[in-house]
Amino acid sequence: MSVRYALLALLSEGPKYGHQLRQEFEARTGEVWPLNVGQVYTTLQRLERGGLVESDGDEEGPQKGFRITEDGEAALAAWLHTPPDLSSPPRDELVIKILIAVQVRDVDVHEVLQTHRRYLVQLMQEWTRLKEHAGDRDLGFALAVDAELFRLDAVVRWLDAADGRIKRARLDRLEPADGHLPKSPRKALVRP
Amino acid sequence: MSVLELNGVSKVYGDGPAEVRALHEVSLTVDEGELVAVMGPSGSGKSTLLTIAGTLEAPSAGEVVIAGAAVTGMSRNDRARLRRRSIGYVFQNFNLLAGLTAAENVALPLELDGVPAKVAREAGVQALEELGLRERSGSFPDELSGGERQRVAIARAVVGDRRLLLADEPSGALDSANGEAVMRLIRTACRRGVAGVVVTHDAQLASWADRVVFLRDGRVVDQTAPAAGPESLIAPGR
């Protein structure tokens, strides 16, 4: 989906040839976004049919030149300013795993949490090492790596919070008073 | 070669019913040039581990070895000398002395160790230069930005011939760009052969380390595997 907008963005700098678009696309996003060559050309054809780009000839191939139309500029601007749909929680396997782990007898939930925490921190170490080696040369790459680090960091923080919450819930349960736990998770959070 | 060795270190505060076990038989070795991050929730013993590693506090049991010398049994004076010469600290709120310039702050550990003021000052300016702060060496802490103050604190921690760098939540209240800059500087110090220990609850900071050790209720419960090469994430098919 975003390939078309990445191509429109490249064309917003000025007219370009097909092969040039492919090279620039790879140079700017290639490391984090591998793509097959054909996808660039088929996407360009589709953009042309939709009136978002114009070409300078009928002959298909890498030498065909493209430029963005006014409709294309407008489509690009509209897309950039439209937030992607993040309104409903994604079905997250890790969350489900932990919800199940707290119900299974003889499972040490803290150990389950730690296994995932270690894995995530190791991934973050690898991304950070990439960022360290890349230095400040490649802005696009640094931005993409940051996005991945913040995403993984959020998961680690959720694990930390879950760890604390589960510990407190267990302590509460040991006190016989009126510490009854809710029977089922809130329906609102469960997607069909 | 290992610069820091903790062998079966325990720390107990108080006694009887008020007894708190802050650390329980913790063993940790940090080699020359290695950066280790210690992660754990508050109350897990992270800061106690760091103060014991820095000889600011004695363990209740176990052994601390720094640069080959056993700290237990050392006289107070010898311990103080070890601290001044071999160990650098970076604190959450930097702890710079307001009445001293950046260069004077950095030179202070050397001067306390008896290095002549002029030589110490030159070493201070040199350390600041390596962190890109030479032109600020005459500035006082309140004339510096948060990021600059932290760089001064790191310069002070690595000035002279320090072997061990200990940092407690070193990015403090800095934003993520400055936090990253701090970790890059600590990495640079480690590449020159300093052994580093960073205590943090922040996974992004910890991920700069060669190895991440997880502490829970005063025990080391886990650690990350040795680093894979930087290519592993962008291998084909991912």
Image (cartoon, coloured by chain):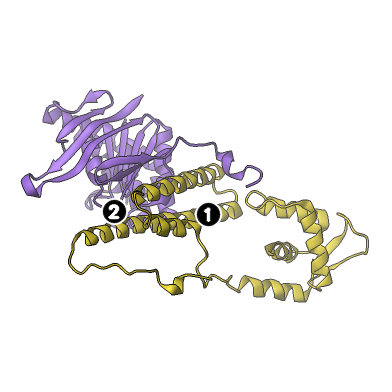
Chain colours: A yellow, B purple
A14 lies above or below B62: below
Across and down, in percent, residue B78 comes to: 16, 27
User: How many angstroms separate mark 1 from mark 2 (CA)?
Assistant: 35 Å
The answer for which chain carries disc 1 is A
Comparing A9 with A86, the one in front is A86
Secondary structure found at label 2: helix
Comparing A50 with A20, the one in front is A50
Q: For the point 81% across and 53% down, which residue is it?
A: A19
Disc 1 marks which amino acid? Glu
The answer for which chain carries disc 2 is B
Q: Are marks 1 and 2 on the same chain?
A: no
Across and down, in percent, residue B18 comes to: 9, 49
Comparing B212 with A5, the one in front is B212
Q: Is residue A42 left or right of residue B46?
A: right
Residue placed under numbered mark 2 in the picture:
B141
Q: For the point 93% across and 64% down, which residue is it?
A: A58
Q: Residue A91: tell me if it is visible.
A: yes
Secondary structure found at label 1: helix
The label number, if any, that marks residue B196 in the structure image: none
Quarter of the N terminus of chain A within the rendering:
bottom right
Comparing B52 with B105, the one in front is B52
Q: For the point 36% across and 55% down, which residue is it?
A: A160
Across and down, in percent, residue A75 comes to: 71, 74
Q: Is residue A68 left or right of residue B9?
A: right
A7 lies above or below B131: below
Extreme residue toward the front, this view: A105
Category of crowding for the residue at label 2, using alpha-carbon neighbours closer than 10 angstroms: few (below 14), some (14–19), many (at least 20)? many
Q: Which mark is nearer the camera, 1 or 2?
A: 1
Disc 2 marks which amino acid? Pro
Residue placed under numbered mark 1 in the picture:
A148
- Residue A68 falls in image quadrant: bottom right
Across and down, in percent, residue A117 comes to: 41, 49
